[in-house]
Amino acid sequence: MVQGPLFPPLTRRKKAPTPGMTDHMHPAASPSSDRDSTPWDLEDDNLHEECGVFGVIGLKSASASVALGLHALQHRGQEAVGITSFDGDEFFSRRGIGHVAQVFKNQDIFAELPGKMASGHVRYATTGGSGLRNIQPLFADLASGGFSIAHNGNISNAMTLKRDLVQKGSIFQSTSDTEVIIHLVATSRYPTLLDRFVDALRLVEGAYSLICMTPEGMIACRDPLGIRPLVIGRMGDGIVFASETVALDVIGAEFIREVDPGEMIQVSHNGKMISQRPFGEPSARPCIFEHVYFSRPDSVMGGQSVYEVRKAIGKELAKESLADADLVIPVPDSGVPAAIGYAQESGIPFELGIIRSHYVGRTFIQPGDGARHADVKRKHNANRALVEGKRIVLIDDSIVRGTTSLKIVQMMRDAGASEVHMRIASPPTEHSCFYGVDTPERNKLLAARMDLQAMTDFIQADSLAFVSIDGLYRAVGEQQRNNGCPQFCDACFSGDYPTRLTDLIEAGKGGGVKIPA
Ligand code: SF4
């Protein structure tokens, strides 16, 4: 078995990577850098989707289309981006720390990424941390030829599989969970690449939407439960895969359908498509939080407009927890559609009581606490003339640690609001996500630590309410949650995880969660 290295010998850098830093094919790796955490950033207390994937085959200038598609998926990961292309002969790659527009800032770059097939990835620091060597697509020269892989999701038995692989001689070059799939493919005993790929994925548990490239073409695949999204589109003679429909819209591709849970689609260079379902057809459990927060509101997911679902959640929230108030105010930007729904259902006027500056980047010199506080105001400021003397209902998508809610409630009071009622467009987030979403450990989640009254006191609101789990299910078009076999993954609310969490159990941290045998 020939197993080529993912990267050449590592070259250690003393300094952490900076935005815009890039590498090329087979890069020198750098040590992981710490995430840019700005403690006073209101957005820091949100959950973060960790990845977006995009791939095209059969299109001229494929890499430029991938860059455009990734730009539309930037909300799914802002730390790093990579694109790999294939020109019929060789693979080419460029990856870097920073946003798509920073790393692919001039057109000349695409001349270095030739060919009619390309795939790309935007990431937040996921399993394994940040650093150039973890930026995807990952690439390896296998016995069957080049193999690149871009992954959205998280493998919940990656550490266990890695330990076995290392014992058998595999040498890992990144700390990404995705590399486990490459080694499983490389060491599978099946004769064809496709059979090896299926064999590898049978050993993997957790969430994965994958876009892979081989010299023969592209393979897109979604995990058997469809936890993370993946859609397929067409543009001229080309086929496009993307995490969300908005990326198809942006490059002018036509939406065909979602890749089904457990479906594997091969597309060859002559445009021939073959679909198979090698993992059977278990009941799907797509992530319900995509509807609440992760996906862009102009995407369509599960056949429904994300924007309309968010408005429907706001309506459910108003039916369940009406506040006696003068104004409905969204926490920008993610609370806006739910606030519109709440206002429409309740008849309370919707107003923009918090104004967000769109010209402030995440990174800013933080000389001290005073300046940090100023940074909050540079990003979000109360519309004092509107709020003063009013009883307001604040609508946000979720509460994670509670620090954001506390600051916003305080901001409203400082601006003269006479009452502040907080309404949350998701049930209490009581559990961590192990499927590719950056969640704090459970003991840092406000709803895991406190009951409703204690949470209300903590954020210093006059009242606090969350939409119920059945209210959320109604908003996504179900009558209620099917408690025996839920229609979605809602584990961060319910603790009812749809897959085994082998690494968690092996680490002795599986207490308090419901995991299938
Ligand atoms: Fe989505 Fe929550 Fe399930 Fe993670 S645990 S996949 S965020 S619903």
Image (cartoon, rainbow, N blue to C red):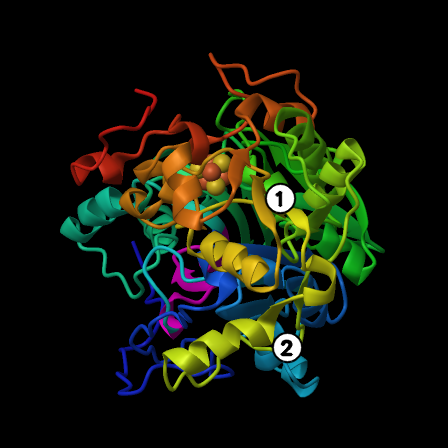
Q: Quadrant of residue 308?
A: top right
Classify the position of the C terminus by image quarter: top left
Q: Nearer the viewer, residue 88 or 280?
A: 280
The segment highlighted magenta reads 132-151
Say above or below: 68 vs 423: below
Other-residue count near label 2 (Cα within 10 Å), few / some / many at <14 / 14–19 / ≥20: some
Query: What residue is drawn where x is 59% and y is 39%?
Result: 425
Q: Secondary structure at mark 2?
A: helix
Q: Amino acid at mark 1?
A: Leu
Q: Nearer the viewer, residue 226 or 330?
A: 330
Query: What residue is drawn where x is 73% and y is 71%?
Result: 61
- Label 2 CB-ligand 1 distance < 8 A: no
Say above or below: 124 vs 153: below
Say above or below: 321 vs 36: above
Q: Nearer the viewer, residue 310 or 317?
A: 317
Locate residue 107, reporting x and y percent.
70, 84
Q: Which residue is mark 1?
A: 230
Other-residue count near label 1 (Cα within 10 Å), few / some / many at <14 / 14–19 / ≥20: many
Q: Nearer the viewer, residue 272 or 247?
A: 247
Q: Is residue 220 left or right of residue 476?
A: left
Instruction: Decide whether residue 147 is among the magenta residues.
Output: yes
The answer for how far apart the CA atoms under marks 2 and 1 are is: 23 Å
Q: Amino acid at mark 2?
A: Ala
Locate residue 334, reporting x and y percent.
63, 52
Q: Which residue is mark 2?
A: 101
The reply to whether residue 344 is visible in this rendering is yes
